[in-house]
Image (spheres, grey):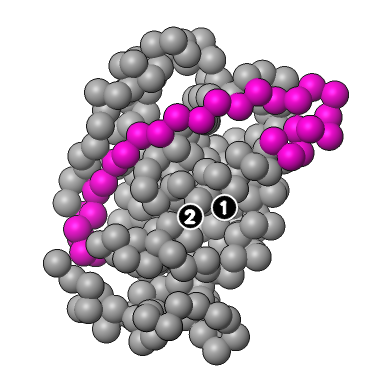
Amino acid sequence: ELIIGKNICWWQNLLGEGWPGYNLELFNYPEHYHGDIENVYIPHGVIMDRIESIARDILEDLGQHTLMVLCVLKGGYKFCADLVDSIKAQSRSTNCPLTVRVEFIRLKSYLNSCFKGIYGFYNKLISLFFPHAKQNVLIVEAIVGTGKTMMSLLKHVVTFQPKTIKVAGLLVKQGPNGAAMLPDYVGFVIPNHFVVGYALDYNEYFRDLDHICVISEKGKLKYKV
């Protein structure tokens, strides 16, 4: 069953299978990744524009209440930091500034480019959420693939009885093995490409790229473990 967040118009940010990305010659990127990426799929400026829009939607929904943000590490840290900054900046221009708390949980589900199951630190949630019961919770994840990681996390979060639970995902993958759920707030819907950059990694490499890029076959082989 496809669960669609009521607050999104994801088709407006749908990057189809035929989208070729941008030529690498148009961008600056670390020299040590030369040949390791095929293209710049989503430039940093486009990412930031979309984050500003997502922050505006979140404020419309939750702007008068304290917000507890749960950032899913490691891939979500840049998205979370930029999203929270935008929420706070926009909130300051209103008559009811939003109080934001940020906590972190680390999850991992991939080795090389293969899904290897979900493992992480759910036990931290016991101490993390108990003091925050009945509060609004926003889970921030960089990429939603099959949705298995997010669904597993949501099952744990709901046991602590927050007032509301919303999910913000910068990227959602489409296709036969794409997401079984759509977050409440979506940045971009993309084909089933393995993308890196903007804190998304391939075996801990490429997190330092500002843009979201498609990794090349050469890059996969070079950094394979």
In the rendered structure, the answer to whether residue 63 lies left or right of residue 109 reads right
Residue placed at 45% from the left, 72% from the top? Answer: 213
Judged left or right of residue 206, residue 136 is right
- How many angstroms separate mark 1 from mark 2 (CA)? 6 Å
Q: Quadrant of the C terminus?
A: bottom left
- Decide: is 20 above or below 51: below
The answer to whether 120 is drawn above or below residue 76 in the figure is above
The residue labelled by disc 1 is: 187
Residue type beneath disc 2: Leu
Query: Magenta part of the protein: which range?
Result: 88-115
Q: Residue at (57%, 81%) from the top-left corner?
A: 27
Q: Nearer the viewer, residue 13 or 119?
A: 119
Q: Secondary structure at mark 1?
A: strand
> Residue 33: image x %, image y %?
38, 80
User: Residue 74: percent from the left, percent from the top?
Assistant: 36, 48
Q: Is residue 25 visible?
A: yes
Please give the label number shown on residue 171: 2
Q: Report if the CB atoms under discs 1 and 2 are less than 8 Å apart.
A: yes
Q: Secondary structure at mark 2?
A: strand
Give the farthest residue toward the left: 225
Q: Is residue 86 left or right of residue 142?
A: right
Within-10-Å neighbours for mark 2: few <14, some 14–19, many 20+: many
* In the depicted structure, whether residue 89 falls above or below residue 176: above
Residue at 36% in and 87% down: 35
Residue 111 image offset from top left, x and y in percent: 19, 58
